[in-house]
Amino acid sequence: MLKIRGLKKTYAGRIEALKGVCLEVPSGMFGLLGPNGAGKTTLMKILATLLEPDSGEVEMNGGDLIAHKDRARRMLGYLPQEFGLYPTLTAEQTLDYFAKLKGVSRAQERRGLIDALLERVNLSGARRQKVGGFSGGMRQRLGIAQAIIGQPELLIVDEPTAGLDPEERVRFHNLLSETAGENTVVILSTHIVSDVSRLCSGMAIIRQGEILAQGTPQGAIDELTGSVWEATVPREKATAFKSHFKTISTQVFDGQARLRIISKGLRPGAEFISLTPTLEDYYLNLVSQTAESESG
């Protein structure tokens, strides 16, 4: 269990990146979902011991990760949003370097470890290829390989599938799912709702440095049961519906507008049919409600 209590971080110019974040994260895959600029990367960097908070506590298995950074780094695996590699090194040379940094001193042990890691991330055939020529997906798979050296108890991945094509996203999803275990906390920080819906048993939503909600993806979806409606109406009628109901999405084509609307217990109009809600419906509804309350 990872316990985060009252984390605050303010940057120069009085920019409050984190406003007293509190979370309890169990073993398994946990999604931290939020728009760009919500504070996700700041939180990930604090957990990875790369950034000092102004105040607050982070505890993992009884240990204080902020006060005892050396201990934290021994139990940590980290794949940042911007993962730098030495382009002239091969895949196996890169992992050999990281294994040395993680304290694997014996050459024979490193060779066995590197073989296993490359096999696990499906890069055995590219082991002698220079990483400067890797595709985005190959780079991310190599990144997760270095992050899981030493079987970390806490694995942090920050926006790992941004920019990947659909096939590589599926490969990366499968790899993350295999990594999450009973004794490992995997935090997936992302703005891609479908990644959290597909992979995570627990989740939290962050916006402007504050946690708006925490629970399970299915629990969030269940909250909107019977509340999501869709219809295709003439464009001139769409404005009236949008002024009276929370609109999740609008798609316009050939003078018609397809509206997806949140309306709890009330059909917006005869044209509308009830739909099964998605996590994206929940996320967009929650984030827009918060934005409206702040502007109001």
Image (spheres, rainbow, N blue to C red):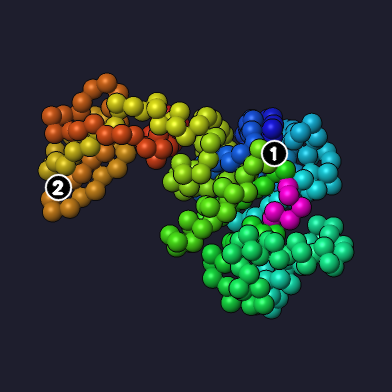
Find disc 2 in the rendering and name its residue: 256
Q: Which mark is residue 183?
A: 1
Position of residue 149 in the picture relative to residue 68 (left or right): left
Residue 226's place in the image compared with 247, above or below, is above
Position of residue 75 in the picture relative to residue 126 (left or right): right
Q: Secondary structure at mark 1?
A: loop
Measuring from the top left, give residue 9's x and y in whole percent: 67, 40
Please state which amino acid type lies under the numbered disc 2.
Gln
Disc with the residue nearer the chain's start (1 vs 2): 1
Residue 257's place in the image compared with 277, above or below, is below
Please state which amino acid type lies under the numbered disc 1.
Asn
In front here: 284 or 292? 284
- Total numbered circles: 2
Measuring from the top left, give residue 202's x and y in whole percent: 55, 35
Highlighted magenta segment, given as a residue range? 147-152
Position of residue 119 in the picture relative to residue 95 (left or right): left
Queried whether the magenta region covers residue 175, the answer comes back as no
Queried whether the magenta region covers residue 148, the answer comes back as yes
The quadrant in which residue 25 appears is: top right
Residue at the image point whose x is 68% and y is 41% from the top:
184
- Residue at the extreme right: 106
